[in-house]
Image: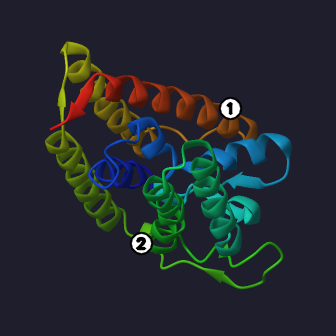
């Protein structure tokens, strides 16, 4: 799941219109922000495997601190708790915490059984949607279209930047998604970490910038 996570963040603008889109898409992607950090520090590992299925090109055999069920709950509570401590906005904190946990739910649907229940658990879960490329594309693209539609109808541009930056974000996400499907697999764990973290920072910054130039409709 990639653009599906961003779709959830786009749609959440209706539930928390006062929260920047940068934060709203950071929350559902937060576990995937932690993952490249943990890859670069060696806390977690991943293997690139040859396969015709682009969704299964990575052997996700070791990511218990970013993607296990228990740690996902921990990260959700921490994210929402920090937001509450800084802003005192209880509603937004609940929404953002739920968005963080939505990542685990969506990954549970898409992943093969490779997600541990907790660090050290020998029980792995995942419904395996990724085993069908067509089904995955249908689900994720439907979610993405819905998320884009909800954000677009919930907000309106204040100026041209609000239009250009927003649609640039949508286009970039689609380009990244197509690149991951049609391009070669990443060369190494380090490359995954660097590219993933760099792309995430850029996307969140662009989302925040676009949102500052839009207002709720």
Quadrant the N terminus occupies: bottom left
User: Do the residues bearing badges 2 and 1 touch, measured as CB atoms within 8 Å?
Assistant: no
Q: Give the residue number, with chain letter if any, for mark 2.
A: 129
Residue 131, percent from left and from top = 44, 70
Residue 3, percent from left and from top = 38, 49
Between marks 2 and 1 in the image, the one whose residue lies nearer the viewer: 1
Badge 2: residue crowd in 10 Å (few <14, some 14–19, many ≥20): many
Residue in the picture at 75% in, 76% down: 118
Residue in the picture at 68% in, 50% down: 35
Is any atom of residue 210 visible in this view?
yes
Quadrant the C terminus occupies: top left
Q: CA distance from mark 2 to mark 1?
A: 27 Å
Q: Quadrant of residue 104?
A: bottom right
Say whether residue 176 is left or right of residue 117: left
Residue in the picture at 43% in, 45% down: 24
Of residues 154 and 129, the one nearer the viewer is 154
User: Helix or strand or loop: what does disc 2 sit on?
Assistant: helix
Is any atom of residue 50 visible in this view?
no
Residue 162, percent from left and from top = 24, 22
Furthest-front residue in this view = 88
User: Helix or strand or loop: what does disc 1 sit on?
Assistant: helix
Q: Is residue 193 above or below residue 55?
A: above
Of residues 6 and 49, the one nearer the viewer is 6
Q: Is residue 104 above or below residue 39?
A: below
Q: Which mark is residue 56?
A: none
Q: Which mark is residue 194?
A: 1
Which label's residue is closer to the chain start, 2 or 1? 2
Say whether residue 55 is left or right of residue 80: left
């Amino acid at each position: 799941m990639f653009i599906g996570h961003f779709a959830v963040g786009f749609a959440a603008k209706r539930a928390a219109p006062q929260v920047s889109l940068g934060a709203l898409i950071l929350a559902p992607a937060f576990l995937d922000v932690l993952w490249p950090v943990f890859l670069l520090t060696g806390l977690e590992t991943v293997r690139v495997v040859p396969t015709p299925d682009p969704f299964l090109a990575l052997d996700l055999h070791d990511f218990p601190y970013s993607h296990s069920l228990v740690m996902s709950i921990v990260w959700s509570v921490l994210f929402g708790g920090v937001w509450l401590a800084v802003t005192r906005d209880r509603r937004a904190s609940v929404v953002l915490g739920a968005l963080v946990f939505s990542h685990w739910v969506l990954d549970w649907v898409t992943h093969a059984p490779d997600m541990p229940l907790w660090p050290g658990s020998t029980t792995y879960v995942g419904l395996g949607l990724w085993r069908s490329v067509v089904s995955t594309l249908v689900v994720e693209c439907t979610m993405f279209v819905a998320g884009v539609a909800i954000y677009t109808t919930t907000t309106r541009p204040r100026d041209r930047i609000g239009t250009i930056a927003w649609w640039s974000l949508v286009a970039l996400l689609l380009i990244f998604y197509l690149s991951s499907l049609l391009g070669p697999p990443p060369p190494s764990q380090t490359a995954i970490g660097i590219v993933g973290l760099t792309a995430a920072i850029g996307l969140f910054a662009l989302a925040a910038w676009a949102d500052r130039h839009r207002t709720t409709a």
